[in-house]
Amino acid sequence: MKLKTILSKKKTVDFLGLLWKTIRKFIRDDAMSLSAALAYYTAFALPAILIILISLVGYFWGEKEIEEQLLSEFTKLMGENGANQVKFMLDKVTSDSSSTTTLVGVMMLLFSSTVVFYTIQHSMNRLWKISDEIRHGFIKYVLDKVISLGFILAFGFLLTVSLGLQAFIAWMDNYFGDFAAAKAQVAVTDSSLLDKALAYLSDIYITYFSSGFFLIEFLVVMTLNTILFACIFKFLPDAKVKWKIAIPGGILTALLFKIGQSVIGWKLGHTDFTDSFGPAGAIIIVFVWIFYTSCILFYGGIFVDLYGKMIGEPVKAIPGEHHHH
């Protein structure tokens, strides 16, 4: 028993040490600048990515619902002002429908959204010290485009699942919440057996399940985010990355993302940036949020690299490409 506790203690120390090392490498490798660049491109590509998402997922759910759901997510993430800014961007792009429907519009959307993924790829290569020199060739170019489109599709899928879940939970809450209200009546009036049964069920639901569903939703969203981040680490950089280092990186990134979502969402919801920045305040909110997310992504990437070295499964450049020091 003694040995086991010592071992698990050592593991915790190792892990904390690793997190600290990751912070130091993050600062040393100037990941801040990479995050700022990514945030800059993402802020410009955001309307494009959102429109692709809305039309993809809207195919299953109806575009209006998706847009509303997305905006309510953004409100949770960055408060009222930020969400309104995103809505404004979307309206600007969609009101130009004549040009958006044309091929040029579509090409612009694809280009600006793939720039984001290219930037992630290029930055990860830099942080992992993997050479970019071998990335010539049309095939590689097309593959990169396909991969980045794949990510947008995957993101759409995750969104669909998470929306479905939220809709289901909201429905359960309403359905049983109504009965809980009706239950107060049951005591007063002599009611049918069915009413009594439903009241009893709603009681059970409210006592045991309603918080349970929030937990389930949290876990599902965490799992989906973990998968998304792990896939970014595994497939975007020009490197061979084992799942067993990509997944811990994904978990860490998803956790930090969730924490940041709560803290920053709260802060942005309670800070009026328009005081200090005027009308630009809302854009700054969107930017701060994207910048934080970019930092987290690269922090996770550096963690994957260091964790891999620690357990003896380092990130390897794809054969035919060479490390540069």
Image: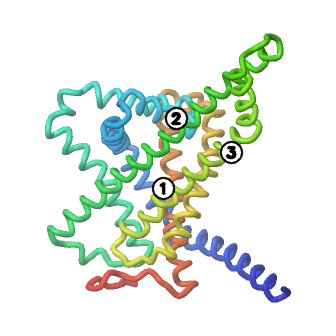
Foreground label between 1 and 3: 3
* x 60%, y 72%: residue: 24
Q: Which residue is mark 1?
A: 294
Give above or below for 101 relative to 128: above
The residue under label 2 is which amino acid type?
Ala
Which one is nearer the viewer's eye here, 46 or 201?
201
Find residue 66 and report its horizontal and vertical position in percent.
41, 33
The local secondary structure at tag 2 comes to helix
Decide if residue 190 is on the left or right side of residue 73: right
Q: Which residue is mark 2?
A: 167
Whether pointer 2 and pointer 3 mark residues with C-beta atoms closer than 8 Å, the reply is: no
Residue 212 marker: 3
Cα separation, mark 2 vs mark 3, equals: 15 Å
Q: Earlier in the sequence, mark 2 or mark 1?
A: 2
Foreground label between 2 and 1: 2
Find residue 243 and report its horizontal and vertical position in percent.
46, 74
The local secondary structure at tag 3 comes to helix
* x 59%, y 72%: residue: 22
Q: Earlier in the sequence, mark 2 or mark 3?
A: 2
The quarter in which the C terminus is drawn is bottom left
Graded by Cα atoms within 10 Å as few (under 14), some (14 to 19) or many (20 or more), the crowding at tag 2 reads few
* x 21%, y 33%: residue: 100
Q: Earlier in the sequence, mark 1 or mark 3?
A: 3
